[in-house]
Image: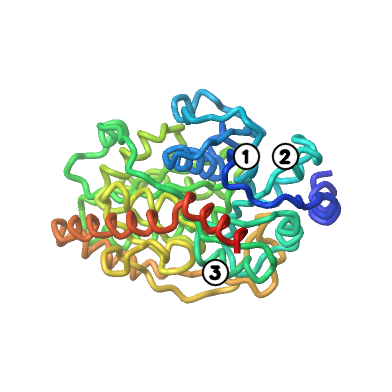
């Protein structure tokens, strides 16, 4: 039944949704639609958007279309600038497969009474058919990176504008090493990922291998990976955890942590290591840079926009064909992603270990690079650009 629904959604429902004929009105409030009360990447994307536009002085309203709401996890983040006036535009922080359900719930008539902007975070250069069908009813598209813009822009006549996630330096909990029994003098390497968004794309196996090579040089090294996922349903995550069983220097946790605890984990790390095969943006990489933690990252896809090549440790990687059973990636002909060599990542970790003061100096410069980039590509500037396009 799930397979039948996916087919009907991709090829029938997506084609039935009409496109609004309204122009963008910069004077009316902006409605943020998304999984606002769910601890998932697209939910955080929507929350960051709402916060950034409120801070910029925009009147915003919120529409939570969460499938599994968890309001208690996000108490206190909601903007104080919420508007009761009908919106002139909406930003949909939902990828195309999520849209039909949310639009039908809202009502098609309501959908076309605003200028609709899709915020689409795709991770490959080849775009699936369902995403192409979803593009046809959006009046504009925001994307988190130049990598995603290059993939999507040729497929639509609508404006496609790069708007990175407005990452900020957020509160970080103290005592995270003590919480997980990690010595204060340990060289802590961390990585945070969601298994649900393709464990193969996040590539934690390569992180483990790079750490194994590095730890031969550094007796005090410890790798802590925070994974989000359902152990009962995710065989890949269970196999990953089993692969490090008995290794006292590697730990994979699936505990539910607050944002402050995750930030605290990153801040208390000596290095953050992401050997992703592909990212639409790379939110945790940006968060690590914002916490002034030295970052080792794959030199490909969305992270290239904000990983300062002089002050982050980049891993050049050959491209290989995508082989993955995840529904989003299965059957994409000619799609490729990166295969970052663990040996290069291990060498970078060694450089950070041997010159910690120099590494911290570079990390501070990387944060300044990221701050400038985010300021130059904000939501507010994207909306101003839309208004200018409308006026011309």
Specify the label residue 245 is tagged with. none
Q: Residue furthest front?
A: 391
* Quadrant (top left, top right, bottom left, bottom right) of the N terminus: top right
| Gap in angstroms between the C-alphas marked 3 and 2 | 30 Å
Labels 3 and 2: the sequence-earlier one: 2
**Camera-side mark, 3 or 2:** 2
**Place of residue 350 in the rendered image (x, y in percent of width and height, measured from the top left):** 23, 63
**Place of residue 332 in the rendered image (x, y in percent of width and height, measured from the top left):** 69, 67
Labels 3 and 1: the sequence-earlier one: 1
| Gap in angstroms between the C-alphas marked 1 and 2 | 9 Å
Residue to which mark 2 is pinned: 102
Dot 1 falls on a residue whose secondary structure is strand
* Quadrant (top left, top right, bottom left, bottom right) of the C terminus: bottom right
**Camera-side mark, 1 or 2:** 1
Residue to which mark 1 is pinned: 33
Dot 2 falls on a residue whose secondary structure is helix
**Place of residue 284 in the rendered image (x, y in percent of width and height, measured from the top left):** 41, 49
Labels 1 and 2: the sequence-earlier one: 1
Query: From the viewer's perspective, is residue 51 above or below residue 10?
Result: above
Q: Residue at x 33, y 61 (%)?
A: 296
* Left or right: 2, with 262 as reference point: right
Q: Residue at x 81, y 51 (%)?
A: 18
* Left or right: 123, with 182 as reference point: right
Dot 3 falls on a residue whose secondary structure is strand
For the residues bearing labels 1 and 2, Cβ distance under 8 angstroms: yes
Residue to which mark 3 is pinned: 337
Q: 309 or 58, which lies in front? A: 58
Q: Residue at x 28, y 61 (%)?
A: 214
Query: From the viewer's perspective, is residue 143 above or below residue 226?
Result: below
């Amino acid at each position: 039944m799930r397979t039948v629904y996916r087919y009907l959604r991709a090829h029938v429902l997506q084609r039935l949704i009409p496109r609004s004929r309204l122009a963008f009105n910069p004077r009316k409030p902006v409605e943020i639609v998304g999984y606002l009360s769910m601890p998932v990447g697209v939910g955080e994307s929507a929350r960051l958007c709402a916060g950034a536009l409120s801070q910029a002085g925009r009147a915003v309203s919120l529409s939570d279309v969460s499938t599994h709401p968890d309001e208690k996890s996000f108490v206190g983040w909601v903007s104080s600038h919420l508007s009761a006036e009908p919106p002139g535009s909406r930003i949909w922080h939902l990828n195309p497969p999520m849209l039909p359900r949310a639009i039908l719930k809202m009502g098609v008539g309501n959908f076309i009474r605003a200028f609709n902007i899709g915020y689409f975070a795709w991770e490959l250069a080849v775009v699936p058919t369902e995403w192409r069908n979803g593009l046809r009813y959006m009046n504009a598209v925001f994307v988190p990176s130049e990598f995603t813009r290059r993939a999507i822009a040729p497929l639509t006549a609508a404006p496609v504008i790069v708007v990175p996630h407005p990452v900020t330096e957020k509160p970080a909990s103290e005592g995270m090493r003590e919480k997980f029994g990690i010595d204060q003098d340990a060289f802590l390497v961390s990585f945070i990922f969601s298994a649900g968004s393709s464990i193969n794309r996040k590539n934690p196996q390569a992180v483990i291998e790079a750490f194994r090579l590095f730890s031969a040089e550094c007796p005090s090294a410890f790798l802590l990976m925070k994974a989000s996922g359902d152990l009962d349903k995710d065989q890949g995550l269970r196999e990953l955890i089993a692969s490090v069983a008995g290794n006292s220097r590697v730990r994979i946790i699936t505990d539910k942590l607050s944002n402050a605890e995750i930030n605290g984990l990153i801040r208390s790390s000596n290095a953050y290591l992401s050997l992703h095969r592909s990212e639409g943006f790379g939110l945790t990489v940006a968060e690590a840079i914002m916490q002034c933690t030295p970052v080792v990252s794959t030199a490909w896809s969305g992270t290239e926009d904000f990983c300062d090549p002089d002050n982050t440790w980049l891993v050049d990687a050959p491209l290989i064909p995508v082989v993955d059973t995840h529904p989003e990636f299965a059957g994409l002909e000619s799609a490729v992603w990166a295969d970052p060599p663990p040996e290069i990542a291990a060498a970078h970790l060694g450089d950070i270990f041997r010159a910690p003061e120099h590494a911290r100096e570079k990390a501070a410069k990387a944060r300044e690079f990221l701050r400038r980039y985010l300021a130059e590509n904000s939501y507010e500037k994207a909306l101003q650009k839309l208004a200018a396009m409308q006026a011309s």
